């Protein structure tokens, strides 16, 4: 599934930046919702790649979420090209939500 378990220090920092992006429909950050699948930091080429998904294909705020991720990462890492790729495999399920995300949802929709 996600390749966010073995991140280096800077990739972990990128993930923490992304954690500031909430899903506007449920109010929980997209990292704890399990929407971020991969973060790759390439110092030599000044590039940061993020692979993420959405909880549903027809998500009405999907474009806004992707743009928000691109903006917050670009603001913290100026001079880097930030590519946020939307992927549908593996398909997101509520099992992707972290324990912290479940606590924030407090028995909510998922």
Image (cartoon, grey):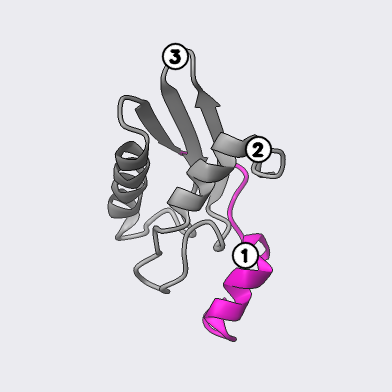
C-alpha span from label 3 to label 2? 18 Å
C-alpha span from label 1 to label 2? 19 Å
Question: For the point 56% across and 37% down, which residue is it?
Answer: 11
> In front: mark 3 or mark 1?
3
Left/right placement of residue 40 relative to residue 27 reads right
Instruction: Tell me which label, 1 or 2, sits earlier in the chain.
Output: 2
C-alpha span from label 3 to label 1? 32 Å
Q: Is residue 48 visible?
A: yes
Please tell me whether residue 110 is drawn above or below residue 5 in the rendered image.
below
Give the image location of residue 95, x and y in percent. Answer: 68, 64
**Residue 109 lies in the magenta stretch:** yes
Please tell me whether residue 31 is drawn above or below residue 9 in the rendered image.
below
Question: For the point 65% across and 65% down, which residue is it?
Answer: 98
- Do the numbered discs 3 and 2 sit on residues whose CB atoms are within 8 Å? no
Q: Secondary structure at mark 2?
A: loop
Q: Which residue is mark 3?
A: 45
Give the image location of residue 91, x and y in percent. Answer: 59, 50
Instruction: Tell me which label, 3 or 2, sits earlier in the chain.
Output: 2
Question: For the point 34% across and 53% down, which residue is it?
Answer: 65
């Amino acid at each position: 599934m996600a390749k966010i378990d073995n991140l280096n220090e800077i990739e972990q920092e990128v993930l923490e930046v992304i954690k500031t992006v909430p899903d506007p429909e449920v109010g929980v950050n997209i990292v704890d919702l399990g929407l971020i699948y991969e973060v790759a930091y390439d110092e030599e080429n000044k590039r940061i790649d993020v692979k993420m998904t959405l909880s549903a294909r027809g998500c009405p705020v999907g474009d806004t979420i992707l743009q928000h991720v691109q903006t917050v990462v670009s603001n913290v890492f100026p001079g880097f090209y930030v590519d946020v790729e939307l992927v549908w495999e593996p398909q997101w399920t509520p099992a992707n939500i972290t324990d912290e995300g479940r606590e924030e949802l407090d028995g909510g929709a998922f």
